[in-house]
């Protein structure tokens, strides 16, 4: 298993697709910073002109904490889409090149082979989220400085600088669980469809539908709590005044269960199917 994992990591970081994806993620992050630097102050002044007359805010409202929160919002679509493309490619590229048949001619367990890809996908996803968090903290604090955080979720919520850092850090951790879920799903889709184009289209469709269903109220409390599409905004519940840690913990654990279930489906299908 160790040899398989090392081989998968080697293949992942040998393909140019991985570096193009990482570059795209950090370019999006840079665009957020540049846009905020040139236009953010004007927008905030317009939105909070009346509130500034009644309330005192510590530091500039256009600050590192707000920028980190804006970067977090790439978790809705940009980051999971890029991750799904890269992760699914670690299997579809082998189908395309025909190398998977060569590997299967060796004394390699099909179950261990596909499990190694899932493990690499999870580790890669966590590393990318960690890098995104670190760069957003480093550059935003270096450029914009500290200050209170303002977030609009049904109503305006205000957090002190120390409280904002605490909530933002937890948000990246919870967001990583959601990103792992989408990465795992994309690899399972690759197991089913094999071809890169089909896999990317289905993966993008899955992501879009998940985001659409997230906004739908099905009018059934248990379904809203259990449906996987309703769990990918768990990190947003850190930005309400009173954090419901029980809900956050249960939602996170349930999303992990869904991820494990998709891994099980992928391993089962791959193990039963001919690799040709």
Image: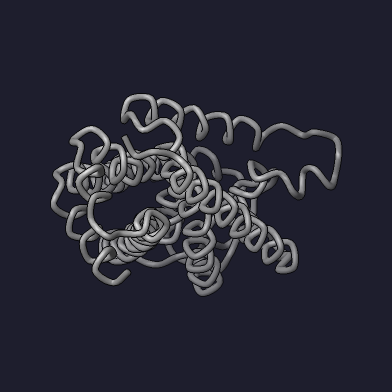
Colour setting = one colour
Q: Where is residue 225 in the image (x, y as percent from the top left)?
A: 76, 49
Viewer-proximal residue among 69 and 219:
219
- Residue at left 13%, top 52%? 14
Note whether residue 140 is visible: no
Quadrant of the image containing the N terminus: bottom left
Answer left or right for 255 relative to 136.
right
Relative side of 50 to 243, left or right: left
Where residue 50 appears, as percent x and y from the top left, is: 60, 44
Q: Residue 195, position in %: x, y?
A: 33, 29
Q: How many marks?
A: 0
- 217 over 14 or under it: above or below: above
Q: In this view, does 31 lie to the left or right of 215?
A: left
Q: Is residue 70 left or right of residue 106?
A: right
Q: Where's the C terminus, which quadrant?
A: top left
Indicate the position of residue 246 as horizontal and vertical percent values: 75, 68
Residue sitting at x 36%, y 45%? 83
| Viewer-closest of 115 and 37 | 115
For the point 65% across and 32% down, which residue is it?
213
> Can residue 138 be seen in the rendering of this structure?
yes
In the image, residue 236 above or below residue 133: above
Residue at 38% from the left image edge and 61% from the top image edge: 112
């Amino acid at each position: 298993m160790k040899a398989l994992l090392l081989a998968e990591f080697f293949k992942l970081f040998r393909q140019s697709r991985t570096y193009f994806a990482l570059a795209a993620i950090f370019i999006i992050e840079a665009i957020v910073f540049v846009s905020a630097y040139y236009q953010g102050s004007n927008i905030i002044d317009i939105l909070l002109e009346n509130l500034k007359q009644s309330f005192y805010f510590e530091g500039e409202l256009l600050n590192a904490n707000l920028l980190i929160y804006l970067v977090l919002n790439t978790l809705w679509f940009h980051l999971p889409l890029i991750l799904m493309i890269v992760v699914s490619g670690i299997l579809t590229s082998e189908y395309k090149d025909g190398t998977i048949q060569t590997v299967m001619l060796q004394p390699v367990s099909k179950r261990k082979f596909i499990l190694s890809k899932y493990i690499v996908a999870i580790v890669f996803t966590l590393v990318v989220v960690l890098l995104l968090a670190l760069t957003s903290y480093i550059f935003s604090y270096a450029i914009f400085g500290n200050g209170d955080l303002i977030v609009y979720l049904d109503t305006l919520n205000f957090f002190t600088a120390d409280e904002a850092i605490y909530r933002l850090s937890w948000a990246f951790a919870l967001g990583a669980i959601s990103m792992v879920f989408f990465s795992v799903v994309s690899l399972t889709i690759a197991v089913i469809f094999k071809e890169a184009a089909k896999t990317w289209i289905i993966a993008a469709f899955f992501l879009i539908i998940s985001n659409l269903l997230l906004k739908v109220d099905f009018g059934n409390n248990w379904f809203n709590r259990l449906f996987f599409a309703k769990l990918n905004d768990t990190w947003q519940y850190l930005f309400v005044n009173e954090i419901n840690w029980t809900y956050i913990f249960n939602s996170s654990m349930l999303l992990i269960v869904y991820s494990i279930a998709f891994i099980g489906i992928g391993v089962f299908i791959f193990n039963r199917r001919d690799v040709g």
